Amino acid sequence: MRRMKLLTKTTVYFLLIMLPVFTAGAFYLFHKFNKEIKHETDEELVNDQLEWLRYLDTAHIDNPIFRFNTQEFQLTPTDKPVQKKYKLKGVHLYQETEDAQAPFRELSQVISIHGQNYQMVLRKSMIEKDDLLKNIIHVMLIAFGGLLCFVVISNWFISRNMWRPFYRSLDKIRQLQLNKMETPDFPQTPTHEFNQLNEALNQMTARIHQDYINMKELTEDAAHEMQTPLAITQSKLELLLQDENLSEEQLKNIGQTSEELQRLSRLNHNLLLLAKIENQQYPFTERPDLHQVIAKYLSLFEELIREKELNIETSLVPTAPWPLHPALADIMISNLLGNAIKYNYPEGHIQITLTTNTFTISNTSSLPEIPAANVFQRFKKNDQGYSNSNGLGLAIVKKIGESYHIRISYQYRNGLHIFTASC
């Protein structure tokens, strides 16, 4: 669903409200003008009738029967009874000069003159008045249209000026980067509501920034404080393993403890790495060539590949600069390639494809498909038989993708586990 900007939405709503109001106002004025013109014409007809009645009442002629027949005045004898009240109505009559039916207002009444009943009909042409009404409506529509345009444009400029502090605050929020170790300042505005908003934003960003600093310090302190005792403990265990007086059972237990300690060290390292990625402590400064990174780790894993007798197929473009921090590019490739080797079976296959914006690695494995809900979640891979794993490798890859707008996806097809990264 396409969403409109607030200013556009306000203008559209304003138009939706004002157009019916202006239209109703135009119709009202039209009918009002039309009614007034008809009323004035009817008054003229009544006055003309009074003048004719005075004239006919005082006329001295030998023949008491009158007969007049013109388009605007008719007086003809009739047997109809005298009418106390005249009748007014609109009629259309043919006019030779216009060669068309023309509108008239008509007054008719049966009167008595010298004892003889006559049908008196007076008419007034409405052509000029209709033209006048059309001209008035034309001018009125132009005035209303101009007024509407002026109001809409004025409203748009006023609204844009009023909402400018909001958009400035919005731009500052969009440009906010916690890793730059600075807090934005949202200034005072002439509008009370925007001042309240900016004050709330200042408080919120200050809290977020302080939480970020605390988290960053905790991450750095944990990395230092935890790795040191782990390294010391690991060193002590290695010394114990060299003691010839230990029994085989003791050596076995110490060896298992050492392995778990190494696993704990890797877990600590990976959790700290995830925290650093989430805190955006790896700013994007350059584009590492993914071709060189893949070649480097193929060389580093060469012994493992040879040990399992894996068949490696590659299709790589000569250069593929990706929008990644160099250290995270190494981690992404080493995790994906390491998993493809580690969980493969002897004499299995690995296929690597690299284009300018897509990296795909697929591998055979005796392990089943990873459920879509679990594939990138932390600590979920052990449930599927992935031994000696802390379940963070793919989670780290996914988090790297999210931080640098790289889409990471997983498929299982024809016995192959396929991971794809697209930028």
Image (spheres, helix red, strand yellow):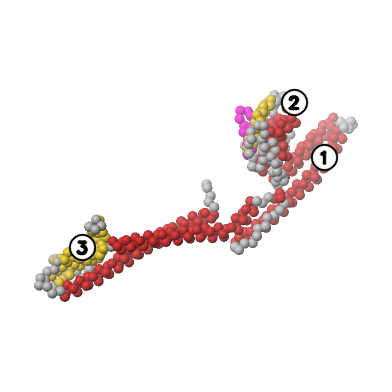
Name which of mark 2 and mark 3 comes first in the sequence.
3
Q: CA distance from mark 1 to mark 2?
A: 29 Å
Q: Amino acid at mark 1?
A: Ala
Q: Nearer the viewer, mark 1 or mark 2?
A: 2
Magenta-colored stretch includes residue 415 = yes
What's the magenta bit mostly, secondary-structure-wise?
strand
Magenta-colored stretch includes residue 169 = no
Query: Dot 2 corresponds to which residue?
Result: 307
Residue span colored magenta: 407-419
Q: Amino acid at mark 2?
A: Glu
Query: Dot 3 corresponds to which residue?
Result: 71
Q: Position of residue 297 (x, y in %)?
A: 73, 32
* Residue 248 visible in the displayed image: yes
Q: CA distance from mark 1 to mark 3?
A: 120 Å
- Helix, strand or loop for disc 2: helix
Is 277 rendered above or below residue 346?
A: below
Query: Dot 1 corresponds to which residue?
Result: 231
Of the pair 227 and 169, the residue shown nearer to us: 169
